[in-house]
Image: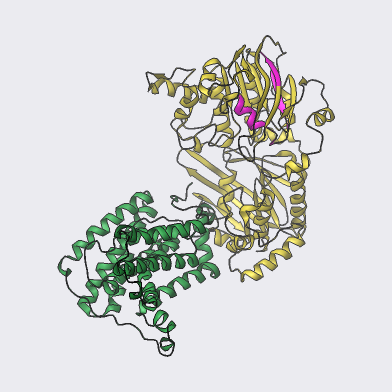
Amino acid sequence: MTGTLLKLEGLTKAYPGVVANDNVSFEIQKGEIHALLGENGAGKSTLVKTIYGLVKPDTGRMELNAAEFIPPEPRAARAAGVAMVFQHFSLFDALNVAENIALGMENPPPQRQVAARVREVSEKYGLPLDPDRIVGDLSAGERQRVEIIRCLLQDPKLLIMDEPTSVLTPQEVQILFQTLRQLSEEGTAILYISHKLEEIRALCENATVLRLGAVVGTCDPRETSARDMAEMMVGASLHVPEKATADTGETVLALKALSAPAPHQFGTALKDLNITVQTGEVLGIGGVAGNGQDELVAALSGEMKTAAGMVELRGTPVGQLAPNARRAMGLLAAPEERMGHAAAPDMSLTENAVMTGVTRKSLAQRGFLKWKEAKAFAEDVISTFDVRTPGPENAARSLSGGNLQKFVIGREILQDPDVFVVNQPTWGVDAAAAAAIRQAILDLAAKGAAVICISQDLDELMEISDRFAALNEGRLSEPRPAAGLTVEEIGLMLGGAHDMEAAHA
Amino acid sequence: MDLSAINPVLLLASLMVAATPILLAAIGELVVERAGVLNLGVEGMMITGAVCGFVVAVNTGSPWLGFLGAAIGGALLSVLFGVLTQYLLSNQVATGLALTLFGLGVSSLIGQGYIGIKGPEFPDWHIPLLGDIPIIGPIVFQHDPMVYVGLLICLGVWAFLKYSRLGLVLRAVGENHDAAHALGYKVIRIRMAAIMFGGACAGLGGAYLSLVRVPQWTEGMTAGAGWIALAIVVFASWRPGRLLLGAYLFGGVTVLQLNLQAAGLAIPVEYLSMSPYLATIVVLVIMSAGRAPGSLGRIFHASR
């Protein structure tokens, strides 16, 4: 099974203010697993949407099996043998699995036959799935199986997968990779989009790297190091955050027997948390998701009020104070969910900057906002943290995940916090932006602030923390110096393996 | 008070007639909402249908042509709503309310010369054999044809949504328009078709009032029937079967309270008049367990 399946020549697509694809050319061979690499906003999504007929290129041409290929709509692309598994947005929660799959087929047989074929394909490729279940009740991994099976039922020649593993547990990733390898052996080419380099090294035979819309290189990921690929993506040598020698001082924040009931049905109660944080240190808090991280951030930021003495800032009880009162005293927080929690998606960056910065940056006077100062503050955040956006009047929604994350973290850091609480600072952020965010957190600590960094990424915590503590079922372990901690020791602090499986299921 | 004056057979027989206008308008709105569009202009489309149907029927002498004219009139008004909300992306709630006000105004303009005129006769259908069955015959099988047309539309919508490919696509568009668009379905085209179907059904419902129930033209004669139809769609959790039940329940209590008023029940008339609304809402609230279509009322734009 050799020969070129898909050939792209000089594809260009420009949107107002940005060239999403700039003269992109490459080839995909039959049966090949081809990686498309690039940072957020490098033009990967636009390119695959072009191949799938959702976007029309301004110039350039495509060839599929040596024949001209210009799909005017997804229907035509599907008919030509191109199938796509979307990152999000393509399942119908209220419909069942078989109905969802029938919707993605060109000439679907009656529902009963669809269900039978779903069972057949799901057994063949080891993707267990019940066609009668309502999609809204399925886990993220199961939903993805629905999409994959929907594609497989059309016998695709090319399967496009857009960031398929961002929602999967490690076990589910392994199942997915087995399926993809099996498909590749059967002659189906796969275009695999990701910025997770280790996955690409484990799976793909060939890689095309995009940067700012243009192809900047190709490589064989099996023989290229993750670091080299990252540098191709970023276009500069990757900066590894450097930690200044810790110079910790007086205690600024203290939790004293902090307990709080679970705020909602699926929440976690906080149980008797005791810890102190000193100036100039980064306290890393690890743990599997759903062990009280969100609740701890809420208790620290003031979203969830507790008894006054449970949270003390420089010896003053603040547990009963609301977020703005705590901000005025120097305690700032950046929550995990950037869209809708840290930032209001449809409001401009200036307006978003005002929302947390109004107190410390004195952006209001007698109830009136000082827009000029607010805009200057937003521009300051944008330039200091290298947020890629045309300007502060753009809506938060228009920023890519990494850029918005840099904005919401930069917004807090530029308010000179004494204590900064951050949850999952680099979740879903590409390598370069993640490095920049970590460096900013370290710089903040070096300037004498106390930082609490909550994360599920243990490598990240080991990189930036001075001390490490683990959150497990709402309880906080005794903090230990991060230097010299082994993986086994951390595992034990996280409560061993007993609830890892449950948390992932 | 003399309850013996109420004939249960006649009562049940008039139930189906009383329910038909609301049933027609509601089944149309159900399709619209399943496609993800909230059209609050049902009342306006109904009254426009009522006047269009009456005018056409009077001028042609044919009630059937009247109903056809009513469907076209309702659909035309709904196209206005569709263009505003689907192509010009206006807010659906505001546009729907405006459509009701516009429909009320336009209908009284059209109906200027027709007040007090009597429309052509629309005879009941005495279905052979079935209509001769004692008791059941007069209750179910001796109505005018539009009663059965309404039932057939309801049945057709149920089968369309449950079994047909296009019905599945329509539900998908209403559930998640971004996903439907990503799969290559024409969200706006499907919604326009649904909106026009809803307009035509509302027009038929209105014409049933002006041609059968009353039968003459009066300004504002729908008197809130369109709002009841909207409420029934929601409380029926967007399911045709429950919608039929809700419409018949409303029709039944309406007829019953009229009979009770005539029989001189010692309850203030106001309470009796409100009873159909109250009964319908209470029953459907108790039953309702459904979930609204995911994209209901949200503006669709392909770039987001």
Name the quadrant of the N terminus of chain B.
Answer: bottom left
Q: How many marks?
A: 0
Residue at the (49%, 52%) spot, across then down: B295
- What letter labels the chain drawn in green? B
In the image, taking residue B265 as reference, residue A178 lies left or right, namely right
Among all residues in the image, which is located at the extreme front? B1
Q: Nearer the viewer, residue B222 or B35?
A: B222
Q: Is residue B1 above or below residue A371?
A: below
- Residue A405 percent location from the top left of the image: 58, 31
Q: Is residue A473 above or below residue A206?
A: above
- Residue A279 percent location from the top left of the image: 66, 13
Residue A96 lies in the magenta-colored region: no
Using the rendered view, name the quadrant where residue A188 is placed: bottom right
Residue at the (79%, 32%) spot, across then down: A495
- What letter labels the chain drawn in yellow? A
In the image, taking residue B194 as reference, residue A2 lies left or right, namely right
- Residue A1 percent location from the top left of the image: 75, 60
- Residue A426 percent location from the top left of the image: 64, 31
Magenta extent: A274-299
Q: Is residue A485 visible?
A: yes
Using the rendered view, name the quadrant where residue A287 is placed: top right
Using the rendered view, name the quadrant where residue A290 is placed: top right
Q: Is residue A7 above or below residue A343?
A: below
